[in-house]
Amino acid sequence: MFIDEVKVHLRAGDGGAGCLSFRREKFIPKGGPDGGNGGRGGDVVLVCDTNQGDLEDYRWQPHRSAQNGQPGMGRMRTGFDGKHLEMRLPPGTQVLDLDTGRLVAELTEVGEHITLLEGGRGGTGNAAFKSSVNQAPRTTTPGKPGQTGSFRLVIKTIADLGLVGFPNAGKSSLTRALTSARPKVAPYPFTTLHANVGVIEYPDRHGRIHLADIPGLIEGASENRGLGHRFLKHIERCSLLVFLLDLSGAEGRKPEADYKVLDRELRLYSKVLAAKPRLVVANKMDLPASAENLARFRAKVSVPIVPISCLDGAGLPELREVLWKAVRQGSIPAAKPAKAAKARPKATFKPKLARPKPAAKTKAKPATKPKAKARAKKR
């Protein structure tokens, strides 16, 4: 089980007490005081170690103490200092005060050492109090107690990329395809129960990118549905959020609806996290309905999109290139606008005007010839 949050109760070592002693040797009368000082108590030191994967060691042993300092001894001998308590923690661990919730320390660099609690100072022996007027002092001081405290240890994974998506979207499959990490893959939801970190290698560029895969989010995660928001803290340090969407619609959901749900859950968790740069990776493009869903998604959501298929590996080289440029060069591809359909000209209403009827053509009567004078009367 991956343990990313524990409560611990720590105590630094107490200082050793000073010694009350007088020199007792043959032929040396009145040897005087020779009590030594006590040793210093051990500190509680935090060490950032990449060999530690989680906080499981501290779940079952939450009470830990450093070694106390050794008391002083005769013959002016000082007690040994107490051994430090070294707590080896994974990178990205935050130490919070259990009572106030204040951030006390944070481990980000490998090999980093932070003193969390200081041990007590050792007491003073009676030899330190001798003087011309007090040649046989019997005064000593006890060691001071070490510091104590109760803390909450929280892991926030250090990664460049954070994978966000619904269960069964293919996050673990993508992690296996891009990195050497081998998270569990199975045909049922919530296969991933804890955060997985993989490394994307770029041998030709002598570089690498860390990828964090967290359990899937569902609608209502802010109300503790599914696995809730508790794993989103692992992507708070990421410089780029990768939204992995199932473009096949095999589960009866629309990709654009999934994107809106994921965006809403991020905003409910943290506005700072929701404002980070993002990239949409369209998975399962090998299925028949994916192309049509991708065209509809591009028409409704304006975000950079990289179509891939984890099954046959299509689009993975292009995705590797896009991720490198986004993380190392800070250039994220612009969203491609959807192809707009040719707009049809709007029909305009043209009123029909009544045309005047053409005047009827009147046939011109042929000019009548004047009647010939009546013929002379018949003779």
Image (spheres, helix red, strand yellow):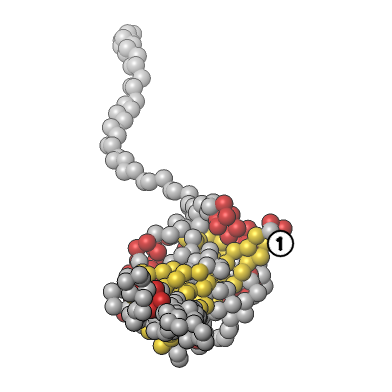
Determine the residue positioned at 49% across, 61% down.
240
Observer-nearest residue: 174 or 253?
174
Residue wearing tag 1: 203
Observer-nearest residue: 217 or 329?
329
Considering only vertical position in the picture, is 103 above or below 75?
Answer: above
Position of residue 153 in the picture relative to residue 352 (left or right): right
Q: Position of residue 323 (x, y in %)?
A: 58, 60
Residue 110 shows up from this direction = yes
Q: Position of residue 150 (x, y in %)?
A: 35, 81
Position of residue 209 in the picture relative to residue 263 (left or right): right
Q: Position of residue 228 (x, y in %)?
A: 38, 80
Determine the residue positioned at 63% across, 67% down.
200
Q: Secondary structure at mark 1?
A: helix
Hey, what amino acid is under mark 1? Pro
Determine the residue positioned at 49% across, 60% down.
239
Observer-nearest residue: 233 or 51?
51
Image quadrant holding the C terminus, namely top left
Considering only vertical position in the picture, is 303 above or below 111?
Answer: above
The crowding category of the residue bearing disc 1, from other C-alpha atoms within 10 Å (few below 14, some 14 to 19, many at least 20), is few
Q: Position of residue 189 (x, y in %)?
A: 49, 84
Q: How many marks?
A: 1
Considering only vertical position in the picture, is 285 above or below 58?
Answer: above
Determine the residue positioned at 45% across, 81% down.
31
